[in-house]
Image (cartoon, grey):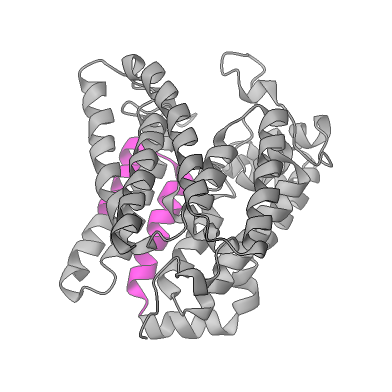
Amino acid sequence: MYKSKIKLKHIFYFNYYILLAELMLNNIKFLELPLKYLSYISIISLFFYIIIHRDYDKKTFLKLLLCTLLVIMVTFVSKNKQLFKLFTLLIAFKDINFDEFLSKDFKYRIFLLIVVIFSNFFGLSTNYIKYRLDGSVRYSLGFSHPNILGLHTIILCLEYIYINRNREKKRLSLFIVSIATFLFNIFITDSRICIIVSALSLLYLCIKKKQLEKIYKIIPFFIKNIYTILFIIVFILAINYSESNRLISKINELSSARLLCAKYYLKNSNIYALFGNYISRLQDLNNPMFLPLDIGYLHLLIRYGLIITVLMLYMYYKALKYLFNNKNYELISIMVLFASYSTMEANAMIGIFNPFLMLLSVFFYEVKDKAIIKEKRNL
């Protein structure tokens, strides 16, 4: 029985690696189409993998069935597959140890990052160069946008911090990696939110675990509901944006007109749509009227609809509550960092860019079924 479960895990990891490769290597032209077709095969394979796990209780099976039907409906309406891929992986995450998963993802993500950067140097992918109004230059080094490159560096940094959190000998290397990520994002990607998150990761390293625990015990309600609270804040800011409001206009300026773009979609889309909206302008980067909807919380609402938004905000709450119950303050801190990141960018909140999203699988599988994070932590 134990050996059969190990073999099943190999199926999960193999298919996950294909989906991650499709995500990270899609700017290498000769790999784009083969990886696209392989990803379809991987999704089908993961469904068979899910079916093999037949030891679901009635409550879990009902959740899986309803969420699958909902996500299929939303995928059909929005014509976007990212949410479908995410939920497929979340459902397939049963019996996968989270720490082991992060260690494997870290190594594989570094390999893919190196492949993309080398492909750029050899002319196999495009280095998209962006210019800010102040004259600063931003580089994507083979990714579709400098912000995407910045996100992958942030993920690798936070994975490295978490994997080595209890290794005192690695303490210095944690600071070196965080500082290197901070400097890389200043001089290469110039992604403001990545610079902020990497600076916050440095601050996190400076705070002792006991102090962190005391801080979180003071404001547990705020931390558990941080995704919902930030959703409400950015929604209010975007819906009330106007040039006459100095404070909101300044926030809009600092966020590279994200509030202005978000207000356009809030006014011109059905924000009460239960199953989301198909937004053609998000699909067409060559459209001169293209307006990016980068704010993760509003992207979630407008593209994927009211039901998915409420569901995912609850799943974030459920995951953070689970982490509090297990006193895993390291992962709580990382989730808080990604909550902050999502006020400016959507990719860490939706899709499979962010491996820490696998924590949301606690919505489906209770601790008694085998802990998602660890079986029982002795703290």
Which quarter of the image is occupied by the N terminus? bottom left
Residue closest to the eye, 364 or 127: 364
Numbered circles on residues, count: 0
Which quarter of the image is occupied by the C terminus? bottom left
Residue at image coords 48%, 55%: 358
* Residue 247 is at least partly visible in this image: no
* Residue 170 is at least partly visible in this image: yes
Residue at image coords 31%, 28%: 141
Instruction: Give the residues drawn in magenta, as a range.
Output: 179-208
Residue at image coords 52%, 51%: 90
**Measured from the top left, where is residue 320 in percent x and y?**
56, 69
Q: Residue furthest front?
A: 1
Magenta stretch, main secondary structure class: helix
Q: Is residue 75 left or right of residue 130?
A: right
**Measured from the top left, where is residue 316 in percent x and y?**
60, 61
Q: Is residue 106 left or right of residue 219?
A: left
Location of residue 356 (image quadrant): bottom left
Residue closest to the eye, 4 or 188: 4
Residue 193 is a magenta residue:
yes
227 up-or-down from 140: above or below = below
365 up-or-down from 87: above or below = below
Residue at image coords 39%, 71%: 374
Residue closest to the eye, 194 or 226: 226
Q: Is residue 258 left or right of residue 39?
A: right
Residue 100 is a magenta residue:
no
115 up-or-down from 83: above or below = above
**Measured from the top left, where is residue 363 in percent x and y?**
60, 62
Residue closest to the eye, 294 or 7: 7
**Measured from the top left, where is residue 294 in percent x and y?**
60, 38
